[in-house]
């Protein structure tokens, strides 16, 4: 069993060569351990240092800086010291090993953040936002995570909780004093409050799709018949030559995958092999993999060559992709155009015209991706968006119990039934904030973190 009273230590920076590396120590013995590990130039003991101060000295024979943050004004609300040493693997490992033999144990994944939650510095939604910040792939997803860490989402959830608590208080007073029966007017006020809460909850859920897109991104696949410019489009989006581009059909014989920031949306984009009828075993496997990626994609980017008429392979792809969300892209508009635009217009509402080689129309393509996802409505990342599936499911369950309470009021059922429904709705909101939790839930959440955070 992990003892939360232990003093813990871990390397808090990424492994590898770097200018600096940090070993973090947190717990009641953090300063006493620092006395053993760190030798300040001024000869004083680290346990005498004031909070939020930095000191120069040595750890074994390596130059280092020691940062002191005393309880409760630290990330974990415990005494924390951080050893800033040279960033090589050996230097950091030696500093950590010295700390471990001096009286602390190695931290579990996410244990520093877990302690921040358990010690009341942040709620559970804010704790989960720390991981979102670490994993952010775009500026917008970073801002979303930072906003949730600041408490934007928690504030919205607390607003819902307070509204339900007021409704519950009115009912509980009547349960405690049954001789004062609830009047139709009181019942109407409670119903009105519950309806308003449900409306607010629905608005948060409606925006959750956008939050999830910013958090998790989308999967997009570039496909098309050979030599239409799929790899050129990928290179144009990346603004670097990632795929080999030649005039020889079938140059791309395997999938190439990258993550691209398109207007704040992390797009995991895959350039697929453009061969319909494989000529050998390698091409057969490449085509098979391409089809698998297409089946998994959130959106398919179907590329055509503007300089030639539609061929049988183009037409076969159009039919194969009937059931998938598709953005049609006509490439090579810098060449003489021969493609039958009217035929394509019969299949696709919006067609984007580009020259990947000359970087023309790329901005229109990126806008088409954004509009496809958000319906022409860009989000403001700082707003309190729900992006975590655990939170979304809890909100949905809370909404179900609010609906049940409303039905009970309409049917004039016993107010204790209404009260229980509201309590259950509150319980799921408490799950989001961590006002109620199980060790199993905490283990599941914090095991996704890296050691040292």
Image (cartoon, rainbow, N blue to C red):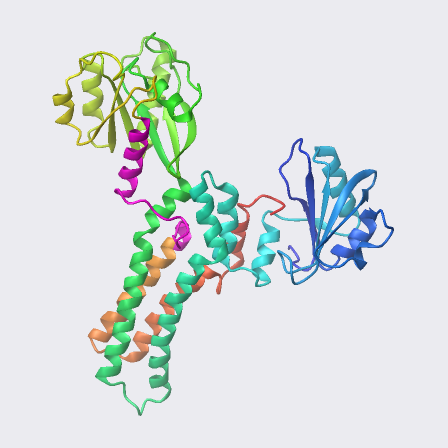
Give the quadrant of the N terminus.
Answer: bottom right
User: Looking at the picture, does residue 123 appear above or below residue 372?
Assistant: below
Q: Residue furthest right?
A: 43
| Magenta-drawn segment | 362-391
Residue 403 placement, left or right of 260: left
The picture places residue 169, in percent across and down from the top left corner, at 37, 79
- Figure label count: 0
Residue 111 percent across, percent down from the top left: 61, 52
- Nearer to us in this view, 257 or 393: 257
Residue 140's x, y, as percent? 42, 43
Residue plotted at (54% across, 52% down): 443
Towards the viewer: 29 or 308: 308
Q: State the residue in front, 36 or 412.
A: 36
Q: Relative to residue 360, is residue 107 depicted above or below?
A: below
- Indicate the quadrant where residue 407 lies: bottom left
Q: Position of residue 247 (x, y in %)?
A: 34, 8
Q: Which residue is at 36% across, 84% downward?
A: 173
Q: Residue furthest bottom?
A: 179
Compared to 234, does 146 lie above or below?
below
Quadrant of the rendered image containing residue 167: bottom left
**Residue 374 in magenta?**
yes
> Please, is residue 420 above or below residue 431 in the view?
below
Left or right of 138 on screen, residue 225: left
Residue 177 is covered by the magenta coloring: no
Residue placed at 48% from the left, 46% from the top?
A: 132
């Amino acid at each position: 069993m992990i003892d939360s009273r232990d003093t813990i230590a871990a390397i808090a920076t990424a492994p590898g060569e770097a200018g600096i590396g940090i070993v973090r120590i947190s717990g009641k013995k953090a300063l006493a351990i620092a006395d053993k590990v760190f030798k300040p130039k001024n000869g004083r003991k680290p346990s005498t240092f004031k909070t939020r101060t930095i000191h120069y000295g040595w750890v074994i024979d390596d130059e280092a800086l020691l940062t002191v943050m005393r309880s409760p004004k630290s990330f974990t609300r415990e005494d924390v010291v951080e050893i800033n040493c040279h960033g090589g693997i050996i230097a950091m490992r030696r500093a950590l090993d010295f700390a471990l033999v001096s009286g602390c144990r190695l931290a579990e994944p996410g244990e520093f953040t877990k302690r921040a939650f358990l010690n009341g510095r942040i709620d559970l939604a804010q704790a989960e936002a720390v991981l979102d910040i670490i994993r952010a792939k775009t500026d917008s997803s970073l801002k979303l995570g930072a906003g949730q860490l600041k408490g934007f989402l928690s504030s919205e959830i607390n607003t819902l909780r307070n509204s339900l608590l007021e409704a519950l208080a009115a009912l509980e007073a009547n349960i405690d004093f049954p001789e004062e029966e609830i009047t139709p007017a009181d019942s109407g006020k409670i119903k009105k409050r519950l309806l308003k809460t449900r409306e607010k909850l629905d608005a948060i859920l409606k925006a959750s799709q956008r939050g999830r897109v910013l958090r998790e991104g989308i999967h997009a696949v570039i496909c098309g018949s050979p030599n239409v410019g799929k790899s050129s489009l990928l290179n144009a989006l990346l603004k670097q030559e990632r795929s080999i581009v030649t005039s020889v059909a079938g140059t791309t014989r395997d999938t190439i995958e990258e993550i691209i920031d398109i207007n704040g949306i992390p797009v995991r984009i895959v350039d697929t092999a453009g061969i319909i009828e494989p000529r050998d075993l390698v091409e057969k496997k490449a085509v098979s993999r391409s089809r698998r990626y297409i089946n998994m994609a959130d959106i398919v980017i179907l590329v055509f060559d503007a300089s030639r008429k539609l061929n049988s392979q183009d037409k076969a792809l159009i039919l194969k992709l009937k059931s998938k969300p598709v953005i049609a892209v006509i490439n090579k508009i810098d060449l003489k155009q021969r493609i039958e635009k009217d035929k394509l217009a019969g299949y696709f509402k919006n067609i984007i015209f580009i020259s990947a080689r000359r970087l023309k129309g790329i901005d229109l393509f990126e806008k088409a991706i954004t509009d496809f996802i958000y319906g022409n409505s860009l989000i403001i990342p700082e707003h309190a968006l729900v992006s975590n599936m655990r939170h979304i499911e809890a909100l949905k369950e809370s909404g179900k119990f609010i609906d049940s309470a409303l039905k009970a009021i309409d049917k004039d059922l016993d107010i204790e039934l209404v009260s229980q429904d509201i309590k259950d709705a509150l319980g799921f909101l408490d799950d989001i904030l961590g006002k109620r939790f199980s060790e199993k839930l905490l283990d599941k959440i914090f095991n996704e973190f890296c050691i040292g955070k």
